[in-house]
Image (tube, rainbow, N blue to C red):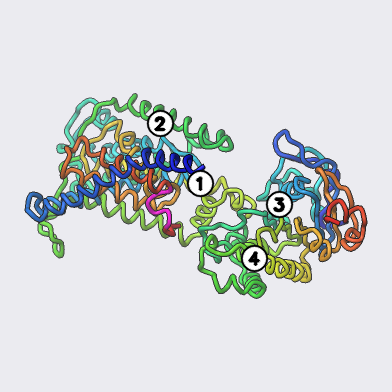
Amino acid sequence: MSTVDVRGRVSDVTGQELVGAFLLLGIVVLVFDLIRQVVVGELSAGLLRSYLWSGIVDSLYIGLAAIGLSMTYSILRFANFSHGDLITTGAFSGWTVAYVIGGAGVAEFSSRILLRADGGAPPGALEMDVLANPLAIVLGLIASAVVTIAVALAIDRLIYRRLRDEGGIPLLIASVGVALALRYLIALFYTTDSRGVVGSAPEWEDPPLLPVEAIDLHEATLVFSAVALMLGVHLLLQYTKLGKSMRAMSDNKDLALITGIPTERVIFATWVIGAGLAGVAGYLIVLDRGTIMINLGWFLLLLIFAAVILGGIGSIYGALAGSLVIGITINLSLVWIPADMNEIAAFALMILVLIFRPDGLFSGVETA
Amino acid sequence: MALLEVSSLDAGYGDLQILEDVDLAVDAGEYVTIVGPNGAGKSTVMKSIFGLTTYMGGSVDFDDQEISGYRPEDIITTGIGYVPQNDNVFPSLSVMENLEMGAYILDEVPEDRLERIFDRFPILEERKSQKAGTMSGGQQQMLAMGRALMLDPDLLMLDEPSAGLAPDLVDDMFDRIDEINDDGTAVLLVEQNAKEALRRCDRGYVLVQGQNRYVDSGDALLADEQVRQDFLGG
């Protein structure tokens, strides 16, 4: 018997844990290297600060989207692969509204409603920035939420509701189909070309009380909107009857049913919040980056999943913390690897967490 | 007519029939126990009354109203409270939030009932803001009962409330159920701890393989030689 035990133990160690230990060692080495680089001056404090700040900004839009993904997971009980394309839906619908309202008289309507699919007047000519066109930008933001919510509710009614009692796998597979359908439906109108739609960001020079020379106002809009929305979701979940019933249903759907909680209404609210935040995230990403493309949400989806898994799937506070870890990781990794490969760092981290803390980095912590 | 009247009920899950021709009645204020071997369908009776199984025939009437085929969210409004055996609290919600969920269908949390529940289970008031999932099994069981009492039901259905409790807590649990019944709430109890349950109740049903086998007062069932031998371990 004892030989079997020993062999069992050895094969455990030579398996996953060895890979994990290797990755863990790598991270420790990198942390020491980071300290060394800062101490000897190879990496300036300013650059380090800008990496960290970009990490926080990235984590905010990842986090906005991760809340919805985590909620659909815990309340509707499936991994929604179409969540990324809800982000794309928000980006295109929101900016279309911003263009229709904001660019009147400068560019053709046909060009504006398809977001420069014809390569029409550049965003600079339309003065597409928050200072020159605040009304259009704000209305676009609202539209991104409203349209995405409507699309998500329609998809739920047409597809997911019919599969509600079939379990997580059929829903997951259906959501992959929905993702593709949604993306190429958008491409049908807007083409697959990546293009600039936002004017260069106005800056606020020498802001008081802050240790920076200038604030990028588009980035500031993203940060402000994201933090406000996250705070709103937190208050809703903790202090309203709807929020409590959402947490109750994510705890135990059967018990929610026999307690008299109207489960379909909770599911409705889940889509409204989750899809609304995803749509806004898509809109704000474009505001910050300046360009829009059809794969915007799809490319982000894996990072969002990584954040949700890192935080312990199903907990929105875990998802937000996971987003922060992912955001910082992909930006800090730029110290060593080129920007087009930095997602490797995020996924290496995810593998590590799945090996050692399969329930998520914060699984032991009270979150809900 | 009885408060709850189940007649010739056939029910199960999907294609699988568990209950066959089950009759059961609970009068207003009465304390009724269902006992029987494992797999007899005791819990299924409760689930069927609450609309959680596949209805296959017969009828369930509550308060002179036919409720067979109703959905759980409608049944809860008729005055039946149900405490399932497992997972009967929301673990990540606080004690207070669990009780609030019990009153979900009301416009606001009824303060007087909350007071009464806190009087009955003082531990719940002490631990109002504690997460339900971090409480002991016995405390969770009290919270689950408290949650079901928030709607002041005419009938409280309890599925194995003593399961998993430490032996010295079992008696306490039975005392609480007596108190709830003494205040006028009819109780339908499913219990593994058959002797104690029969001793406490007004009437008992012995259910075997999804069918009624014996019905009588609790004391008579306890005295019955056949019942003792077959179901109460001698």
Q: Secondary structure at mark 3?
A: helix
Q: Residue lying furthest left in this view? A: A41
**What is the number of the mark on residue A179?**
2
Evaluate whether residue A58 shows in this view. no
The residue segment tinted magenta is: A359-364
Amino acid at dot 3: Ile
Q: Nearer the viewer, mark 1 or mark 3?
A: 1
Q: Are marks 1 and 2 in contact (CB under 8 Å)?
A: no
* Mark 1 lies on residue: A75
What subunit carries mark 1? A
User: Along the line of sight, which residue is nearer the eye, A111 or B169?
Assistant: B169
What subunit carries mark 3? B
Marks 1/2 same chain: yes
Q: Which class describes the residues within 10 Å of circle 2: few (<14), some (14-19), or many (20+)? A: many
Amino acid at dot 1: Ile
Of the 4 image quadrants, the one containing the C terminus of chain A is bottom left
Judge whether residue B214 is colored magenta.
Answer: no
Amino acid at dot 2: Ala
What subunit carries mark 4? B
Judge whether residue A360 is colored magenta.
Answer: yes
